[in-house]
Image (cartoon, rainbow, N blue to C red):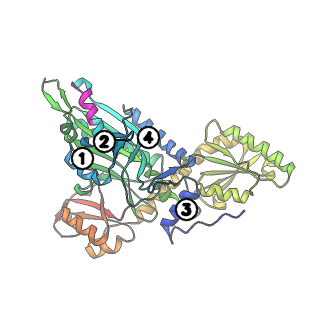
Amino acid sequence: MAYPKLPSRTENFSEWYNQVVLRAELADYAPVRGCMVVRPYGWALWENIQQALDRRFKATGHQNAAFPLLIPLSFFEREKEHVEGFSPELAIVTHGGGKKLEEPLAIRPTSETIIGYMWSKWIRSYRDLPQLLNQWGNVVRWELRTKLFLRTLEFYWQEGHTAHATREEAEEETMRMLRIYEDFAVNEAAIPVIPGRKSESEKFAGAVTTYTIEAMMGDTKALQAGTSHFLGQNFAKAFDITFLDRDNQLKHVWTTSWGLSTRFIGAIIMVHGDDQGLVLPPRLAPIQLVIVPIWRNDEQRSQVMEAAQKVQALLQPTYRVHLDDRDHVTPGFKFNDWELRGVPVRVEIGPRDVAQGAVTLARRDIPGKPGKQTVALEALPQVVGPLLDEIHANMLRKATEFRDAHIYEPETYDEFREVIGRGWAYVWWCGSPECEARIKEETKATNRVIPLDQPGGEGRCIYCGAPAKVKAIFAKAY
């Protein structure tokens, strides 16, 4: 049974990505254009992402809740910027139960409006604050150009929503959640990200300030991997969310929202993948170790399978382990299959290993002989944990080195235009939306992030030459 070769990343990155998603059985195309079916392997990866984030949310006092999928269309008209930003993407329900509805309903593209409405009923006093909510769910945004995980008409995500008594508390919350996303990306997904602020033209519709974590993909394009929004009092005033403060004055609350979606799976694929397929970070991988038994005859099969089951029993309580006992495909096919699926460690057991009381461990992040080691069976539980940590660290190092090698600091606009085709441009920017729009029109590069970590001082805008106080990253993006 032959295993068809994937397209090369360097020759056709887009087709390589599509094929990896389909052939690793992460997702498939749904019958409705722009929608996707997330398959069990892809959903297991999403569940691990959920769990890693959920732990962090609950540790900072947030509680999970659920809000309806259908929202009165009139709710979107209450916040001017919000309705302008989302109107082109709204899916509207006009009929239900065979009858025309008195008021059309929007299928939620995000939940600020419905949560704002509920808060206007629940919040009465400073004692009701802060409200720290998170929702795991799906949303619909009517996208015309779609790509599995990265941009689909319907997608899955978490959206956090909080309400506070003071501006300072809300701004502190916005930054806290940005840092939680950064910590998750680095310490769970081994993806280096640059935290920072979005420009006015790139911020969330209805936000005062939007913060982002930006990641570089394997083709050097940027991906917005998670966002945290300071909403000020925009939604509080639109939905009349007021409270009686300690000074006996009636005031509007200050709100935030923040979200990370299944597009993060796309980030994992594109940051770490290679020409053999997925390379999954150990802390999120649905299967951390796959045991592949190797035999030539029935006698060997019996001995090897017995040993393989012992290894499984040894590791199963602590790690996510799978024993590949398929007997209709060759070990070579299994090796290729599990490489495609990105399993961090392959545990090979053959007759010679059984005789020696050992196994061979093959790392996914280091192909071939350099990534292999023989480990005595009794030492396996002590070896696996540090090995998975080492794989994580190596993946993070490689991704960071790749990103840093493709961030340029051009000093002229001609240099800017040249480097933008092969990486990110980190440049002085005057803050003018006109300069930003012209750069986008002329180069297809957008202002991805104004990093929180700034060099200080002053420079000259890369486009107009005017004095500039901030440096921003411009890049082509997904």
- Between tags 2 and 4, which lies in front? 2
CA gap between label 3 and label 2 equals 34 Å
Which amino acid is tagged 3?
Gln
- Between tags 1 and 4, which lies in front? 1
- Between tags 3 and 2, which lies in front? 3
Q: Looking at the image, can residue 107 be seen?
A: no
Q: Is residue 253 above or below residue 326?
A: above
Q: Which residue corresponds to mark 2?
A: 257
Return the x and y of residue 94 as percentages of the image width and height: 33, 45
Name the chief secondary structure element in magenta. helix
Q: Are marks 3 and 4 in contact (CB under 8 Å)?
A: no
Q: Which residue corresponds to mark 4?
A: 53
Q: Residue 19 shows which numbered tag?
A: 3
CA gap between label 1 and label 4 equals 23 Å
Which amino acid is tagged 4?
Leu
Closest to the observer, 393 or 465: 465
Q: Are marks 1 and 2 in contact (CB under 8 Å)?
A: yes
Return the x and y of residue 345 as percentages of the image width and height: 63, 51
Provide the residue span drawn in magenta.
Answer: 116-124
Q: Which quarter of the rendering shows the N terminus? A: bottom right
Q: Which residue corresponds to mark 1?
A: 207
